[in-house]
């Protein structure tokens, strides 16, 4: 079975509108400057330095490469090429590419090889650098030879992330099919961990760190079956849906992620979700949707991308959390023991490296890869997969075609598609309509609800298609008789006013200096509230330059709420109780404002209805 859809490259697909502004914020923020301010990238052994020579540079490049090419920023592209050139220059004669000596290869966790292979695939798609197929061929052939001979092993992380090498194997099989590629793919699948045997461990969280329950491993794992099916041309057996459903049932959050700080943590809204897991989950959802064409994966992607991703990074994208909480009333270090199961007391702080440096390096892939999922290719033409402002330029049956989408979605629900064809074309434009859409109109006329609008063929010249629909706010049930307010792909939260205290210092040779310093974020307004009815008033506001602005959100929802005796988690002054101590009203309801979850630092999201 082949993929239902495939991805355009950054040369064909470009961001527009608010999406372009979001990518520029990222380029001007920490991801776009990490090679200037952070030793693990700036002084990495990958480029001849004496700092990290494992996952940090590959993680960073996985986001920085598409970011640079999507923005067509020549300065960023030059820095991409410096790193790629430096890495290629250090490739050994036998193909080995990681910065470790021959005698130390056996003890090196070869997960970095799989990760770097993904980077080379992405870079090749962006740059068409003619060196890459040979570099990648020699790199993976060496990996195969050393694994076969027992000179190296999958490694601790590689054992759980074995499928991450499949994008490179898929590319090589297309370019240069040889028997060893199938042998390596089989070796990875049979020697790597079988997640089907682990799911019982995901149902009961432990205060214990394990690879089997590591949230990032699991968010990567969800796409493993579709990668194998793509390579081996096999029929999927529904592993992705099964794994996702189990994880969601026992560890799901209101914003489509799973708790994991950094191992699975149950369904409490005060447990954390690691930022790496957010962007890796997005990557999995993007690939599964492209493979299956099943709209549920695109809706799950939107829910994660428009809520969890912006909420865990500051507006200027210079600081981030290691873990975020759905109900988060304070972001200062816990005194005494940590509230989290397997993370430190400061993991929810905003900063340069509030937890492990993996998230510092890895978070940059989120927005660029989402941008590359806006439009996809099908056998009959183009699919508008995630309706965010973008434009795509391609050739369909020898006819040059451009498709552009102007929209403020998810903050607004109107869409203008402009199709420009240099000749008559039979190209089909499929536009995905979400399940929550109501009162669909096409070019101003009511249209029967459909999961996919299909426009078959276009005349030479310019064609404009206007689409709009309504979305109703709803209280969505959560565990423990709690609710969250959702309108389409946006989850809304009660914002808590916050004070910021900068923390500038140097530790272990790493400088924290504004704007890449750390922050204590303290709540300064009431949070012990509850919904009192299901009536909502929507206010659409003039959007600003920052898409997920905290001070000027593009949309607000008002509803009546009251105070209740919520209480704090036992032993903590800055963590609300998992569920309220009592749900009795303490006062008369008053109208309160809720804003998109991604427009908050501190918030209450899962609340009772009293």
Image (tube, grey):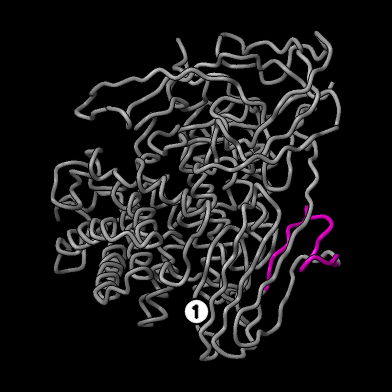
User: Residue at 28% of width from left, 73% of height from top?
Assistant: 129
For the question of whether residue 92 can be seen, the reply is yes
User: Residue at 50% of width from left, 52% of height from top?
Assistant: 220
- Residue 436 in magenta stretch: yes
Could you say whether the residue bearing mark 1 is in a helix, strand or loop? strand
For the question of whether residue 243 can be seen, the reply is no
Q: Which residue is mark 1?
A: 394
In the picture, which quadrant includes the N terminus?
A: bottom right
Quadrant of residue 78 within the rendered picture: bottom left
Front position in the image: 589 or 325: 589
Q: What's drawn in magenta, residue-wise? A: 430-447
In the picture, which quadrant includes the C terminus?
A: top right
Is 78 drawn above or below residue 217 in the view shown?
A: below
Question: Image check: 21 left or right of 503?
Answer: right
Residue 120 percent location from the top left of the image: 32, 65
Residue 606 percent location from the top left of the image: 70, 28
Circle 1 residues within 10 Å: few <14, some 14–19, many ≥20:
some
- Residue 364 in magenta stretch: no
Front position in the image: 404 or 487: 404
Question: Image check: 268 left or right of 108?
Answer: right
User: Residue at 66% of width from left, 32% of height from top?
Assistant: 267
Residue 194 percent location from the top left of the image: 53, 54
Is 374 drawn above or below residue 155 in the view shown?
A: below
Question: Image check: 330 left or right of 145?
Answer: right
Front position in the image: 324 or 479: 324
User: Residue at 49% of width from left, 37% of height from top?
Assistant: 274
Front position in the image: 564 or 14: 14
Is 521 drawn above or below residue 81 in the view shown?
A: above
Residue 377 percent location from the top left of the image: 56, 75
Quadrant of residue 344 within the rendered picture: top left
């Amino acid at each position: 079975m082949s993929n239902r859809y495939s991805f355009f490259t950054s040369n064909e697909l470009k961001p527009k509108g608010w999406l372009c502004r979001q990518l520029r914020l990222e380029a001007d923020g920490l991801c776009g400057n990490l090679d200037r301010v952070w030793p693990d990238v700036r002084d990495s052994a990958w480029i001849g330095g004496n700092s990290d020579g494992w996952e940090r540079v590959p993680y960073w490049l996985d986001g920085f490469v598409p970011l640079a090419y999507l923005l067509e920023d020549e300065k960023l592209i030059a820095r991409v090429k410096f790193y790629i050139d430096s890495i290629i220059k250090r490739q050994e004669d036998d193909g080995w590419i990681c910065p470790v000596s021959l005698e130390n290869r056996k003890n090196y966790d070869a997960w970095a090889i799989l990760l770097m292979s993904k980077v080379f695939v992405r870079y090749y798609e962006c740059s068409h650098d003619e060196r890459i197929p040979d570099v990648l061929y020699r790199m993976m052939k060496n990996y195969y030879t050393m694994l076969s001979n027992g000179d190296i092993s999958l490694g601790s992380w590689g054992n759980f992330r074995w499928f991450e090498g499949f994008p490179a194997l898929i590319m090589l099989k297309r370019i240069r099919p040889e028997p060893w590629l199938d042998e390596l793919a089989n070796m990875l699948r049979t020697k790597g961990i079988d997640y089907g045997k682990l799911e019982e461990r995901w149902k009961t969280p432990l205060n214990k760190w394990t690879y089997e329950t590591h949230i990032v491993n699991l968010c990567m794992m969800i796409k493993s079956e579709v990668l194998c099916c793509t390579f081996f041309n096999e029929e999927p057996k529904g592993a992705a849906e099964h794994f996702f459903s189990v994880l969601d049932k026992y560890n799901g959050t209101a914003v489509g992620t799973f708790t994991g700080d950094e191992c699975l943590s149950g369904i409490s809204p005060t447990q954390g979700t690691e930022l790496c897991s957010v962007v890796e989950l997005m990557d999995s959802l993007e690939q599964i949707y492209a493979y299956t064409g099943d709209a549920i994966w695109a809706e799950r992607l939107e829910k994660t991308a428009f809520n969890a991703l912006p909420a865990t990074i500051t507006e200027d994208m210079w600081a981030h959390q290691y873990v975020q909480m759905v109900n988060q009333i304070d972001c200062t270090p816990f005194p005494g023991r940590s509230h989290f199961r397997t993370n430190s007391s400061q993991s929810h702080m905003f900063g340069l490296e509030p937890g492990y440096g993996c998230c510092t390096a890895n978070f940059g892939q989120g927005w660029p890869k989402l941008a590359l999922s806006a439009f996809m290719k099908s056998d009959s033409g183009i699919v508008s997969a995630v309706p965010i402002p973008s434009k795509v330029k391609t050739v369909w049956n020898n006819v040059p075609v451009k498709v552009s989408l102007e929209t403020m979605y998810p903050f607004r629900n109107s869409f203008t598609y402009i199709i420009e064809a240099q000749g008559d074309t039979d190209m089909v434009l499929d536009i995905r309509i979400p399940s929550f859409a109501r009162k669909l109109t096409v070019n101003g006329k009511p249209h029967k609800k459909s999961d996919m609008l299909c426009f078959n063929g276009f005349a030479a010249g310019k064609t404009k298609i206007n689409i709009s629909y309504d979305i109703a706010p709803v209280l969505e049930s959560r565990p423990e008789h709690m609710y969250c307010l959702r309108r389409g792909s946006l989850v809304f939260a009660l914002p808590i006013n916050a004070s910021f205290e900068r923390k500038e210092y140097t530790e272990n040779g790493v400088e924290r200096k504004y704007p890449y310093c750390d922050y204590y974020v303290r709540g300064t307004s009431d949070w012990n509230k509850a919904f009192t009815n299901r009536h909502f008033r929507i206010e659409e506001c003039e959007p600003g330059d920052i898409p997920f602005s905290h001070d000027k959100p593009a949309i607000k929802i008002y509803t009546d709420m009251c105070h209740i005796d919520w209480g704090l988690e036992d032993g903590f002054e800055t963590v609300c109780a998992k569920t309220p101590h009592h749900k009795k009203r303490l006062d008369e309801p008053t109208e309160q404002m809720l804003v998109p979850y991604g427009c908050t630092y501190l918030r209450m999201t899962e609340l009772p209805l009293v």
